Amino acid sequence: MKVGLRQSMAFLHTWAGLLFGWLLLAVFVTGTTAYFQDEITRWMQPEIKGERHLVASAEGAVDYMRQHAQGVETWSIQLPGKRSVAAMGYWKEKGETYLQWRDHAFMVDGRGVRVDARDTTGGWLLYRLHFDLHYVPVLWGRWTVGLAAMFMLVAIVSGVITHRRIFADFFTLRLGKGQRSWLDAHNLGAVLALPFHVMITYTGLVTLQAAYMPWGIAAAYERPADYHRELTGIDAPPTRSGTFAASAPIADMIAQARARWNGADPGFIAILIPGDANSVVKITQDTGTSMATRGETLTFDAATGHMRTPPASRGGAAMTESVMVGLHAGRFAPPALRWLYFLSGLMGSAMVATGLVLWTAKRRLRLPDPTRPHVGFRLVERLNVATIAGLPFGIAVYFIANRLLPSAMTHRAAWEANWLFIGWGALLLYVFLRPPRRVWIESLSMVAVAYLAVPAVNALTTDRGLLRSFVAGDLVFAGFDLSMLVTAAGFAFAAWKLFRRPLARVRETRSRRERIA
């Protein structure tokens, strides 16, 4: 029997979406939160207060390392962006890798004063989970996410071909109609943000193109490090002379960098072999306001403060790649556009989630006995619950752990991350112990309670609760707590709708299946 194009695309769309659907949902959810990773990090470090002052923070970080880190290889300072307050400083000793920098990390507020803030990865964890999968080895994690993104592109194209009335159905949303409602919701989430879905999936692959297609680099360069050095414009590190030389004021070098960048701020400072006569200072432009995500790096003689010859302008290919990465990350976006990114990401999450539910809803009608589905069906059904409800539950547990874990706890940041997966795993186990219809209601209710608990625990453990933040005009803390309450209300509403769903609807579905048969 000859199969038409639409039928072939329907098969491809269905299985491409299902096989990677759970991973894609996790990627969409964590990627969506990453658009506010700076605000999440600020909320997770309530000890840091005040206003942003970039130069004072840089000077304070340099002064602290001058007192506590003489003779090391590198001083590094991650400066606060437009949406941050504090700078993070750290140093690298001889023989250490940059993976060990947390052992020497510290925070400096806008006054240049060191702050004893709790150790946390903040919003950075969710951002890295988006494409590294955290516990998975980095290369394997990125390859897995990249493969899922490729299947996502296949699902988008095949979905448009399959649903010939997809744009007409976009204006139709029939609530309370069972499978039809799930399809309408799936179409709505897919079409409303379709340009975003295509852009975010394609640019996501571009961000890691060197890992997916390394053959061009291998053909043109003997060592991959040479390629990355040329791409970033960073030259070879200086050699130590053994002669001490005091460093020129960092504020003067920041002023020179700002003048070259037409007022743009630096985002990162590295001081190589500090205190030596050959020491150099490298200042990299912050890309928080530019669509290009790879900022220029300027080099200064640390002893004199004079700028060396700026690097050559990047070629068209490098700039195109930089803009692609910037489009994906969205760091350049002003508040209104960032919210549009965020809402589009939520629609992408809803698109994947409704697609997973729709898969089980359609196939339940074809089962010989819908009340006793086979093992494969039960597995898919429970994995749907474990992902759609489990990941949000784990994220809520992550936020609560940030407030409840002792500040002086060893490996505190790692244990915060562990609690995200402990919460997710606990709900996964619970899902497999309960009946399907009940587990949806109970799991969604548990997620609602968890998000309701976040602002409550925050108010009980800090002086930056919702009401106090409103009174103080702290929009970041107040906005975060409000978003937790809105999320809790959304999951509670979903649980209530399922609870109110008449059991007669289930019997009606079964009778309709029998009539079809």
Image (cartoon, grey):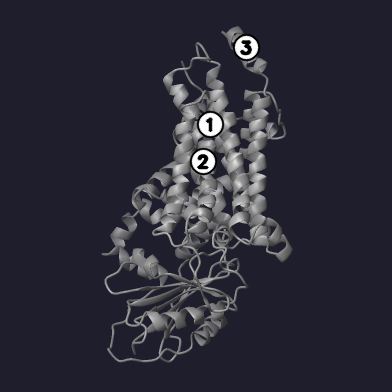
The answer to which of 353 and 371 lies nearer the viewer is 371
The answer to whether the residue labelled 2 contacts the one labelled 1, judged by CB atoms less than 8 Å apart, is: yes
Q: Quadrant of the C terminus?
A: top right
Give the structural element (helix, strand or loop) at label 2.
helix
The amino acid type of the residue labelled 1 equals: Leu
Return the x and y of residue 345 as percentages of the image width and height: 59, 47
57 relative to 131 in the view: left or right: right
Q: Earlier in the sequence, mark 3 or mark 1?
A: 1
Q: Secondary structure at mark 3?
A: helix
Residue sitting nearer the eye, 104 or 179: 104
Give the number of callouts: 3
- Residue type marked 2: Leu
Quarter of the figure with residue 414? bottom left
Residue 161 seen by the camera: no
Q: Is residue 68 above or below residue 326?
A: below
Kindly identify which residue carries mark 2.
Answer: 25
Binning the other alpha carbons within 10 Å of mark 3 as few (below 14), some (14 to 19) or many (20 upward) gives few
Res. 30 mark: none
State the CA–CA distance, disc 3 to disc 1.
Answer: 22 Å
- Identify which residue is drawn at 54% across, 50% down: 400
**Residue 160 coordinates in the image, percent (x, y):** 58, 35
Amino acid found under the numbered disc labelled 3 = Arg
Mark 1 crowdedness (10 Å alpha carbons): few <14, some 14-19, many ≥20: many
The residue under label 3 is 512
Report the residue at 35% width, 47% height from top: 140
Which residue position is annotated with label 1? 356
* Location of residue 215 (image quadrant): bottom left
Residue 321, x across and y down, in percent: 47, 60
Residue 197 position in % (x across, y down): 57, 45
For the residue labelled by badge 1, is the local secondary structure a helix, a strand or a loop? helix
Relative to residue 473, is residue 280 depicted above or below? below
